[in-house]
Image (cartoon, rainbow, N blue to C red):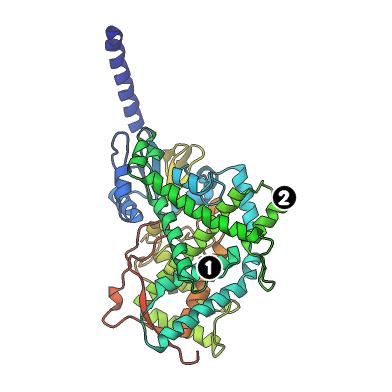
Amino acid sequence: MILLLSIFLPIIFFYLLHKTRKTTKSNLPPGPPSLPLIGNLHQLATASNLHFYLWLLSKKYSSPIIHLKLGSHPLIVVSSPKLAKEVLQTQDLSFCSRPKLIAMQKLTYQYSDIAFSPYSDNWREMRKMTFIHLLSTKKVQSFRPIREDEISLMIAMISKSASSHEVVNLSEMATALSCSLICRIAFGKRYNNHESETRRFKNLVNEFAAMTLTYFVSDYVPALGWVDKLVGSTKRLDRAFENHDSFYQELIDEHLDPRRAKKEEEEENILDTLIKLKEDKSSPIDLNWNSIKALLMNIFIAGADTSSRATIWAMTALIKTPNVMKKLQAEIRSLIGEKGKVDEDDLPKLPYLKAVIMESFRLYPSTPLLIPRETIKKSILDGYEIQPKTIVYVNAWAISRDPEYWENPDEFVPERFLNSNTDLKGKDFGLTPFGSGRRICPGMVMGMVNVELIVANLLYSFDWELPLGIRAEDVDTAPMTGLAVANTNELLLVPQKYGIV
């Protein structure tokens, strides 16, 4: 036995060494050296702002495409509009899956959703159903009374603070508004001024964000999976799942209660539609309660999180550029006159508003790294060979600040979008806040109208100032880490009523 080991161990060693060298010499993009077993996991897990760290790496290696390893899993990061187009459009079918991660598997009920599920026939049917029945343009328009009602309630609340010259926590108000909006649209429930419910919604969103940021060792080094239990990651995931599951189950139980009284003046909400599709068996897929919960999670997290953060980033950008704010207020107030509010019919007549929102999306993307993709088959990208099962990050933050694509990329200049054909529908790859291709966000139409209508009414109804002693340059634009990023510090402003309101 000892003789056999003495013969075969050196053979195995040199075989593995040869294999390692062969892999090293393969046609891969540049990138930092990786450690045995864990790859670059330690670097990514400790980066405070991952999109910024990856941008610095791209600069260091002078390449718009870089290569890293998450355990044994290859990872590439693209940071140019040209390569984003390849990933999101030209080779979309090769790059359109999602990595299978423990947290997402749990929170999506074994990949029963559309945002995080790997590419499959079932996913395609789910996506089709979502676009047709849940988030079509017609369906989004049907929720117009809810949007206008909720925004009017927020404006009335801010008016009370304006009367006494109080400081308003706009971050908090925008979050509460987004939660209230999405709860009425998706679940048919009103939560106005219910502080305990608002806290619950915020906790649910924060729990979900925390799980998307947690690197589970089991995903990348299965042999060390016990570490997840040791450090408490598994327990936190179980708790987050239980909190989400109980929330969605409560909503379903309420809708199934025969004593429930539905308000006839309100449009059928999204959960009503899903239950009807399930009961009538009119969906091309076999809808069950878990897949309904997974879809509710997608809609709630996206609607309550990204819309509020996009609103706050827009207001942050405007308070830091008073000349832009005044120009936009002049456009809005000239059009609206003494009507008292901006409604959805007014939005197409406000080109500078649209330009401001687009510039805010460019400079402060709510999702700086689009949701990670995974390759389905071998492909060639920028001359490099990309293997199947490679995780792909599209660094939208880096792309939107690319000096080769954008003039003065670090400046907030909405005028760049006036008389421009650039749009947000995933065809202009220097600006893709909603993604593109098969994985484009199905809630794009609703997200855009929500943000435009909220910002327009905030600027029509009030003049905004910073609290005493705070200068525009002091307003923090450092982002918190997350799938959707917000300002590190909350936005505190002082509203003054506009004369005719």
Residue at x-position 48% and y-position 39%: 379
Residue position marked by numbered label 1 in the rendering: 448
What percent of the width, then of the height, locates residue 440? 54, 55
Residue at x-position 32% and y-position 64%: 478
Q: Nearer the viewer, residue 247 or 177?
A: 247
Q: Amino acid at mark 2?
A: Lys
Earlier residue among tags 1 and 2: 2
Residue at x-position 33% and y-position 51%: 54
What percent of the width, then of the height, locates residue 358? 47, 68
Residue 195 sits above or below residue 398 on the image: below
**Displayed quadrant of residue 196:** bottom left
Q: Nearer the viewer, residue 14 or 446?
A: 446
Q: Badge 1 local density, few (<14 within 10 Å), some, or many (20+)? A: some
- Closer mark to the observer between disc 1 and disc 2: 2
**Displayed quadrant of residue 8:** top left
Q: CA distance from mark 1 to mark 2?
A: 32 Å
Residue position marked by numbered label 2 in the rendering: 281
Residue at x-position 50% and y-position 54%: 244
Q: Amino acid at mark 1?
A: Met
Q: How many marks?
A: 2
